[in-house]
Amino acid sequence: MNDNTEKNTEKNTEKNTENNTEKNTEKNTENNTEKNTEKNTEKIKKEQNFAEKWDKIFDCGENMNEDNKKALNVMKTEGMDAAINHMFTDQETGRQLSYSEMRMRYG
């Protein structure tokens, strides 16, 4: 082979490698995003079911203060992560609560 042919072969090989790497990275990212979304959806559904059962077993609507009712409702509709975020946020100011402040409100 002459020098130009070798250089062109090297350039094409590098380009193909780069393109394949980009395509594989995009595919892996899409697959991971789909898997994570599915896992997250399953997790939230389990948490919502837990909150529904908890509410029925302990008749929370009658035996809970308003702050706890709202937090339970967030858990039933949005899942545990959202409920934790809700409980650590002052609902009037949006300020993050300390652990002790959260415990004073929610027990």
Image (cartoon, rainbow, N blue to C red):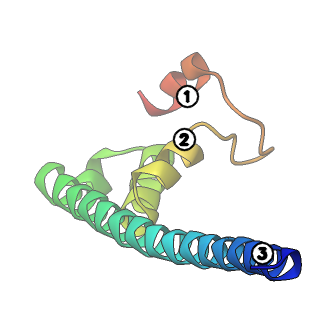
If you read the primary sequence from the N terminus, does the residue marked by circle 2 or circle 1 appear first? 2
Marks 3/1 in contact by CB < 8 Å: the verdict is no
In the rendered image, the residue lying farthest to the front is 1
Q: Which mark is residue 80?
A: none
Task: Report whether 78 appears left or right of 91.
Answer: left
Pick the front one: 38 or 45: 38
Mark 3 and mark 1: Cα distance apart in space: 68 Å
Marks 2/1 in contact by CB < 8 Å: the verdict is yes
Marks 3/2 in contact by CB < 8 Å: the verdict is no
The residue to which callout 1 is attached is: 102
Residue sitting at x 64%, y 72%: 17
Q: Secondary structure at mark 2?
A: helix
Q: Quadrant of residue 38?
A: bottom left
Q: Secondary structure at mark 3?
A: helix
Task: Mark 3 vs mark 1: give the one in front.
Answer: 3
Number of other residues with Cα within 10 Å of mark 3, as a class: few under 14, some 14 to 19, many 20 or more: few
Number of other residues with Cα within 10 Å of mark 1, as a class: few under 14, some 14 to 19, many 20 or more: some
Where residue 40 sits in the image (x, y, percent)? 39, 63
If you read the primary sequence from the N terminus, does the residue marked by circle 3 or circle 1 appear first? 3
Pick the front one: 83 or 3: 3
The quadrant of the rendering that contains the N terminus is bottom right
Q: Amino acid at mark 3?
A: Glu
